[in-house]
Image (cartoon, rainbow, N blue to C red):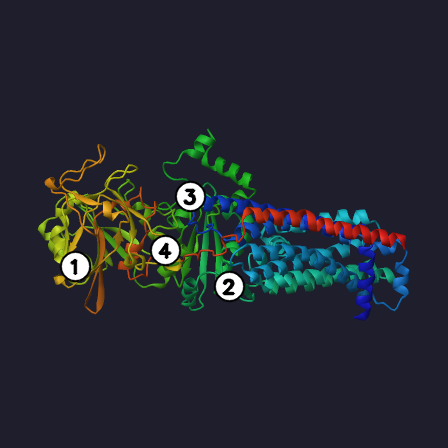
Amino acid sequence: MKKIFKVAQAELRSLFFSPVAWFVVICFYVTIAALFTTMTSLLSNLQDVQFELEPQFRGFNMGMMKLVFLPVCGMILKLIYLFIPLLTMGIINREITNNTHYLLYSSPLKTRDIVLGKYLAVVVINVAMLLALFILLTCGYFMIVNVEYKWFLSILLGFFLLMNTYAAIGIFISSLTRYQIVAAIITFAVFFVMENFSAIWQQYDFVRDLTWYLGIAGKAELMLKGLITSRDVLYFVLVIILFLGFTFIRLSSAQKSITRLKLAGNYLLLFVVFLSFLYFSSRPGKILYKDVTRNKINTISPLLQDLLGKLDGSPLKVTLYTNLLGRYAEFGLPQKRNTYQWGLWEEYQRFYPNIEFNYVYYYDVAKHDSSYYRFYPGKTLDEIVSIQSDMFGVRRSLFITPEEIRQQIRLQDDDLGLIMELEYKGKKELLRMNGETPPWPKQPTVAGTLKRILRDKDIRVAFLSGHYERKPYGKFERDYYRHLNEKGSAHSAINMGFDSDTVSVLHNEVPDDVDVLVIASPMSRLQDIETERINRYIGKGGNAIFFTEPDKKFILDPVLQNIGVTVEDGTVVFENPHEMPHIIPSQFTEAGIMMAREVKSEESIRDKINLTRMDLIGGSNILFDSSRGFSMEPLTFSPVNNTLWVKKGVLVVDSAAPVYSSEQGDYMRENYVMAAKLTRRINNKEQRIVVATDGDFMNSLRYFNGSQGLAFYSWVLYNEYPVYVNELRDIDNLFTVNYKTTSIVRYSLLYVLPGILLISAIVLLVRRNRK
């Protein structure tokens, strides 16, 4: 070890007494300082503006680790390979150029001492460069609230391994030529190839995994995101050993006579050993993970972990169906297969390695879709497929015909695009895309699909039909298609674990397999037999949701009064110069917040401030009689309730604002209950019912405008569905300093410190030259 340190010491003296090392360190520091201070100055200025506009500003929607450090580290990742070749280009060939290699070979030093000593010197310089990054991270630690220092350590580890891997490659290339400029150019080229190697020949099965594992792209990205894996750490260690081994073989062959065949055999043997270790260290189930982030953003939720834990080890088969002529086709093609497997499924394989992947490629168009025929006029479908396959760079023969795919699976009812099918012990369920780019399903969708596979009985929410009610599959504005059956939405009920359809009780009782009965704003009177059957369903302990409207309340009165609910006559209104008078801005009560794990509900609980919002459109006040055996809790309240009143008679909303008139029967109350939940114990279970005097806040037009999503359904389904997998809000979302302070920091980091480094370098180099 002493010999290695001596070589490293001599190499460091040589490097730091030349302008190259100083130039590299200063340029690296100035580059990353410019990136960091630009982001912090921009966001701190924006924060100051936000506080001026909104003194109660709670911070940015994302944490500073994501807003500042991840983008900056991403840019550094793309630039860092530009600096290392300048350090390594003369590390070996300088000895050959100066004819000092004979002295090294004749000294007591062994070849490994020379290689490891020179490599150690470059490692020290890399540490010096990382010290600059450490200074910036330290500044960020004091400038931002609740910073995650463990994440900082993961970032430093990622760059440390990456830079030292580049250094090992550069040292080997330096040993191949006696010209430093040639070595630098070749090193740049090799770095570029390795950065893009994982994308080469990905359409070919034979070499896909080989190029993917060998490429350096993405190997440090997980560590920058706060996830340390044994696979990535071992990759860097193995590549370092490989190229240092190559350098050792190269220098050893220069000292003694060796045949080219034996030399090639030595290289090949080392490379095969490297590939073997690389392969086995990358197998699912053999990889160790450490997520150092506070909110475990790189790890699937504990709920999903529990679901995967319920699988008994049997294969979970995932079949990806890719339509060449469908949406997102480019994401499902063979050249994207590793991105799909590792980018989407690795976090699931971490907890359940036995996932098998199948791929089906086909072409098909919807019955009335003529877009491709219009885009390629005069072309047949086969000709269009040939053109598209050539454009994507894949074989035409890879795609089966519409007739063949329809024999395997029926996809016509879904989007004829990218879609997955999960199969476990013979049970199959579709796993749909999320409608975004990239389109891969998010955790709630995967969780909902896994619950479908694991359960014995489907969950059915049935909507009463026959009286012009709102439909779960109707695509009109008043219907509920958007939040229940929109297959392209990651937030719809069908993708989160439960189904909804319609049921009529005119000729039959409510079916026994109905988990929840929903009566959504009927527009015509129920027949007596229907009322009786609904009341029998309620009487047996069935869960239900009732939506009624002020002008049609008489339709559901016979049912609601049976559970102790009376909807008062009239419509709740208030004078609002910015909106129609019957649109009441409301929030959930504490009982409403606690009824389901909606995102705003969880944020409200954590931040101890009510962040829920929903606009009730034409609601009435609810009176309750507890003699029917139910307990009632209001679900909503209106912050403007001191200006609310109930307007009797016909309400005109598109004319002059209504005026309170007690002579016409208008009246005021201290509190208005426009939505409530009812519970009682019956048949050894808790019966749950929701009553809302407005159904418009859940319709396809209003649903995403601040509503509480699927909270009503979740509560009446005992919070088993939908499957909530909510990301926790980042708490490192504010600066502790203002824009003026960040400007001072920017000036210090970008000008003062580099100036000190430059002056130090000049003084040291001048003194060296004088000696």
Q: Is residue 532 rendered to the left or right of residue 697?
A: left
Return the disc, 4 or 1, that comes first in the chain's sequence.
Answer: 1
Cα–Cα span, label 1 and label 2: 45 Å
Return the disc, 4 or 3, that comes first in the chain's sequence.
Answer: 3
Cα–Cα span, label 3 and label 1: 46 Å
Cα–Cα span, label 4 and label 2: 37 Å
Nearer the observer: mark 2 or 3; the answer is 2
Amino acid, disc 4:
Ile
Q: Are marks 3 and 1 in contact (CB under 8 Å)?
A: no
Whether residue 333 is situated above or below residue 117 in the rendered picture: above
Crowd rating for badge 1 (residues with CA inside 10 Å; few <14, some 14–19, many 20+): some
Nearer the observer: mark 4 or 3; the answer is 4
Residue 443 position within the rendered picture, expressed as x and y whole percent measured from the top left: 43, 56
Q: Is residue 293 rendered to the left or right of residue 405?
A: right
Q: Which mark is residue 537?
A: 1
Return the disc, 1 or 2, that comes first in the chain's sequence.
Answer: 2
Amino acid, disc 3:
Pro
Q: Which residue is mark 4?
A: 609
Q: Outermost residue toward the left?
A: 528
Nearer the observer: mark 3 or 1; the answer is 1
What residue sits 63% from the left and 50% below the top?
76
Q: Which residue is mark 2?
A: 350
